Amino acid sequence: MIWIWHALQELAMVAALMIPIGIIGAIRWSMWLAKRIPALWYRPIINDFDCTATVVTPVYNEDPVLFRKALESWIANRPDRIIAVIDVTDTTCMRIAADYPQVEVLPIDIPGKRPALAAGVDRADTEIVVLVDSDVIWEPDVLRKLKMPFADPTIGGVGTRQHMYPSNGVRPTFWERMADIYLDMRYSDEVPATTVLGRAVSCLSGRTAAYRTRLLQSLREPFLNETFNGRPCMSGDDKRYTCLVLQRGYRTWNQLNARVYSTFKPDFTGFRKQRIRWSRNSFRSDLRALWQGWVWRYPYLALVLIDKTVAPFTLLLGPIVLLTALWVGAWQIVIALLVWWHLSRAVKLWPHWRRRPADLWLLPAFIGLSFYMSLLKAYALVTINEHKWLTRAVAVVDGKVQRVSEAA
């Protein structure tokens, strides 16, 4: 009878560990399928539509070599105008931009990326304006493809497909490869799914996004004067523009055949700080959208925003169960969890493995990083009122956006 009692105790312990994680796992897989299946139906818009376009880039202490490559790639796309809004302290990039007669240089002495974007948009007089980060390199046909969705008058903004560009121009670091994996995750599931189901993408990445010029010009005040909990918002400009466009009743589209290449932070410190900043921006924007209620006009997008808010914290249940199983010596549970994590992540990351099969060996590291990212997002939520920039020596101090001694 004793062995029966011990067997029942062990069974109860297994159930206590596995049932909660099984329920959470079923929910997570359901949400993944709810994105992955619609994403399979995505197709870019292809037509002969054409219109005038202005490229606007905010520039602050950009790497000179990278800035030249970016400028030349935009010029090759033959926009009607290119406006480089350059911080007055960045004399190097001003000299570089002045070397190109196609580029209009607009110096600005107001700190922050948002005022630079707004100044460039104000100068634009074409039908669409394309906002581009100063380190982004375009393929030769990006602008032509970006214009096509604007044939639909209900579409107010169009995004691109981003890829990681090595900061040294040759070989990516471990952290750049991790960033590349996260890009493939987003652009194989969430982005095409929200594009297909409702034409409402939650964020047209600021690396390259096109908008109707007059629409952006009409959004100048709410864009520049965004606040959260009474504090001015400094970063998150791409999320803000996208949400304002959706609030106005327009649709947003991602043209995934328009490919651009951007650098990411090559070391752990940069990777971590960048992810914290992005997470804070997402929490502020998504929680506000759900609270204000306008996002409910796009039911599928609302579902995705709720899932993105909750998912990082449900993910932490896995490591808790693993540590508990290790503590009590439930080795079968330990092995089952480790095997399942590797199999499930391998399936979800299949689009990346297909593009970069050599990265398959990074799978165990990515699994560990995904749990760490959940902790970072928890930290970002707790510190949601902090407003810092990683690459700009600008921060919110005493309720105002000001220049500071160094970047975050």
Image (cartoon, grey):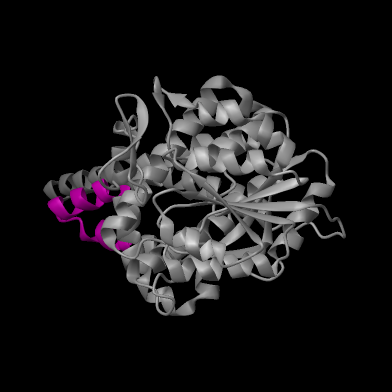
| Residue at screen point 55% across, 35% down | 240
Numbered circles on residues, count: 0
Tell me, yes or no, if residue 100 can be seen here. Answer: yes
Residue 262 lies, in percent from the top left, at 50, 63
Q: Which residues are magenta?
A: 317-339
Confirm whether the magenta stretch covers residue 319: yes
> What residue is drawn where x is 54% and y is 62%?
97
The residue under the point 40% across, 19% down is: 230
At which x and y percent is residue 249?
72, 30
- Residue 218 percent location from the top left of the image: 68, 29
Q: Indicate the quadrant where residue 281 lies.
A: top left
From the top left corner, tell me how far across and down residue 96 is, in percent.
50, 65
Q: At 39% from the left edge and 38% from the top edge, which residue is drawn?
A: 280
Instruction: Look at the image and tell me whether residue 37 can be seen.
Output: no
User: Magenta includes 53?
Assistant: no
Residue 104 vs residue 80, the one in the foreground: 104
- What type of secondary structure mainly makes up the magenta span? helix
Q: Quadrant of residue 405?
A: top left
Q: Is residue 33 left or right of residue 255?
A: left
